[in-house]
Image (cartoon, grey):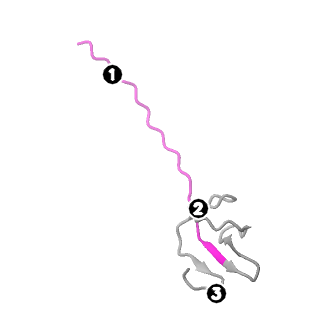
Amino acid sequence: MGGGMKNVVYTSERVDVVHGRWIYHDDDMMPWVSCSVCDVCTDSMNKTPYCPFCGAKMDRERRDDNGKNA
């Protein structure tokens, strides 16, 4: 009868996820993107899954500045 009970503690933290999308802009100089949540602009065209400024998850449809899907 030597099997001891293991103490198991289940915890849960809930964080609300903010969803956004990259908005692509193309001016005469160079293309750039902005976050639809915080409006911060960056010239980085890499498609990161999260905004590095506000942390929004970029899983909404991507659109250019004319409202068309990119």
Which element carries disc 1, helix, strand or loop? loop
Q: Nearer the viewer, residue 69 or 14?
A: 69
Name the residue beneath numbered marker 3: 66
Q: Position of residue 14 (x, y in %)?
A: 53, 50
In the rendered image, residue 12 lying in the magenta stretch gets the answer yes
Q: Position of residue 26 (x, y in %)?
A: 69, 81
Which element carries disc 2, helix, strand or loop? loop
Q: Amino acid at mark 2?
A: Thr
What label does residue 5 carry, if any?
1
Query: Which image quadrant for residue 42?
Result: bottom right
Residue at left 70%, top 59%? 53
Residue at left 69%, top 71%? 34
Comparing marks 1 and 2, which lies closer to the viewer?
2
Name the residue beneath numbered marker 2: 48
Q: CA distance from mark 1 to mark 2?
A: 45 Å
Q: Position of residue 45 (x, y in %)?
A: 64, 68
Q: Nearer the viewer, residue 41 or 56?
A: 41
Q: Nearer the viewer, residue 66 or 3?
A: 66
Q: Amino acid at mark 3?
A: Asn
Q: Which residues are magenta?
A: 1-24
Q: CA distance from mark 1 to mark 3?
A: 62 Å
Q: Amino acid at mark 1?
A: Met
Q: Position of residue 63 (x, y in %)?
A: 59, 79
